[in-house]
Amino acid sequence: MAKKPVQSKEELNADVVQLQGGSIEDVEAEIVHIHQGGANQITAASVDIHQGAALAVNSDSILLQQGAAGVVQADTANLNQSSAGVIYSQDVYADSSRIGLTVSRQAILKDSRSLILLAGKVQGNVETVMDTRQAMLAGLVSGVAVGLMLFVVNLLARRRS
């Protein structure tokens, strides 16, 4: 496995990518390590981001330490003092982190916050705006409200005709 140091590049395909302090558009590799750098899109078996950021990550496992990610799709996602917009993962482990939307089979959260949390099993002290039950109720209420609005608009349109 050859390591390829990168400063700034559009696209990179390699076995192992080690990025320090630079940025790259798209990365496709088996293993990706980013330290104080950033990437637009990462596709890899294993991703480790320390004090860096990525817009989109598709990986078997991701370790995000003091970093940020827009959208993460992974089998296992580990966050430590990090932020993510959306995480879709089988297992999420977060410590002192902030997540917008978490969708997972199991979420273990310590001193973390997820605005919307949809998980089969939740452990730890987590702050949410909406959990699975509340999200389902909000969806149901929204659907009924939109249906009623469309019904009224349809009735008014028929009366004017």
Image (cartoon, rainbow, N blue to C red):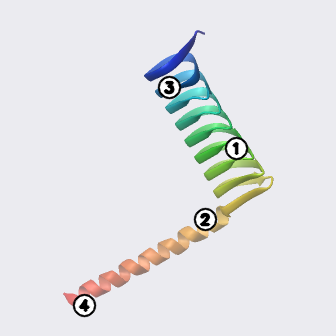
Residue type of the residue flagged with mark 4? Arg
Residue 159 drawn at (x, y percent): 24, 90
The residue pinned by badge 1 equals 92
Q: Earlier in the sequence, mark 1 or mark 4?
A: 1
Please state, as top left, top right, bottom left or bottom right, where the N terminus lies in the image: top right
The residue pinned by badge 4 equals 159
Q: Earlier in the sequence, mark 3 or mark 2?
A: 3
How many numbered circles does the render carry? 4
What's the CA distance linking mark 1 and mark 2? Answer: 19 Å
What's the CA distance linking mark 4 and mark 3? Answer: 58 Å
The residue pinned by badge 3 equals 27
What's the CA distance linking mark 3 and mark 2? Answer: 34 Å
Are dots 1 and 3 in contact, CB under 8 Å? no
Q: Secondary structure at mark 3?
A: strand
What's the CA distance linking mark 4 and mark 2? Answer: 36 Å
Q: Earlier in the sequence, mark 1 or mark 3?
A: 3
Q: Earlier in the sequence, mark 1 or mark 2?
A: 1
What's the CA distance linking mark 1 and mark 4? Answer: 53 Å
Mark 4 closeness class: few <14, some 14–19, many ≥20 residues within 10 Å: few
User: Which residue is rendered at x = 57% and y = 36% of the image?
Assistant: 53
Q: Earlier in the sequence, mark 4 or mark 3?
A: 3
Please state, as top left, top right, bottom left or bottom right, where the C terminus lies in the image: bottom left
Residue 149 drawn at (x, y percent): 40, 79
Residue type of the residue flagged with mark 1? Val
What's the CA distance linking mark 1 and mark 3? Answer: 23 Å
The residue pinned by badge 2 equals 135
Select label 1 or label 3 by which is in front.
3
Select label 4 or label 3 by which is in front.
3
**Which residue is nearer to you in this view: 100 or 67?**
67
Is residue 122 positioned above or below 39 on the image?
Answer: below
